[in-house]
Each structure stands twice: as structure tokens, then as C-alpha cells.
Amino acid sequence: MTYELRDNSGSLFKNDKKEKTSQPNARGRAKIGGIEYFVDCWVKEDKNGNRFQSLAFKPIEAKQDRSARRDDSSFDDDFL
């Protein structure tokens, strides 16, 4: 059974492959307004020492569109 995201919800999972502080602590997916996003999460600290979570959202479709353009053998490099 495949997990299906419901609208306006998401999931994060610990990033076990993290090697640098610039990489997210957790990664996942969310669906907002019918659009699916990759979600990255960093645990940060403000100037008063309070910890908080910072999130970044990237549309999944945008990444798939770029991959499709790269794989398109009819793309004319001379045009650029």
C-alpha cells in the first residue's frame, strides 16, 4: 500500500545521510493547495539561544520538468 499525501499535510524524516551542517536535519514531502513539494528542515538557533526549525519547500513538479528537459534528445544545444 502506497502512502498518499492529503492536501495541506506532509511528513518529515531524519536525514541519515547528513554529512555537513549546510545539509538539512530532516527531509520529506508535503502537499499544499494540491501541489506536492519536497520539504527540507534545519534545526537552528536564534541570537538568544532559542532553537527553532527552518523549512524550505521546493515543488516536486519543477524538478521533474528539469529532468525531462535534460533527457529530451531533440533539444538543440546550438540554439543557446
Image (tube, rainbow, N blue to C red):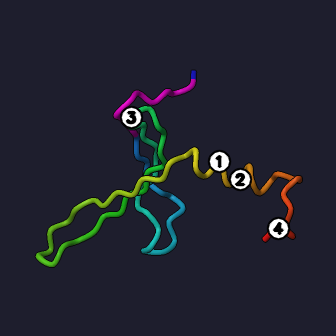
Q: Image height check: is 2 above or below 79?
A: above
Image quadrant occupied by the C terminus:
bottom right
Q: Residue at x 65, y 47 (%)?
A: 64
Q: Which residue, given by chain and number where applicable, does mark 3 sit on?
A: 33
| Dots 1, 2 in contact, CB < 8 A | yes
Please tell me whether mark 4 sits on a helix, a strand or a loop: helix
Q: Which residue is mark 1?
A: 64
Circle 3: residue type: Gly
Q: In the image, which residues are magenta?
A: 2-10
Q: Residue 47: where, in percent of width, then height?
A: 15, 78
Q: Residue at x 34, y 34 (%)?
A: 8
Density class for disc 2 (Cα within 10 Å; few <14, some 14-19, many ≥20) is few
Residue type at the position of mark 4? Phe
The residue to which callout 2 is attached is 67
Distance CA(mark 1)–CA(mark 2): 5 Å
Q: Does residue 38 belong to the magenta stretch?
A: no
Q: Position of residue 59 (x, y in %)?
A: 50, 48
Distance in Å between CA atoms under marks 1 and 3: 19 Å
Q: In whole angstroms, how far apart are the C-alphas of marks 1 and 4?
A: 22 Å
Amino acid beneath label 2:
Ser
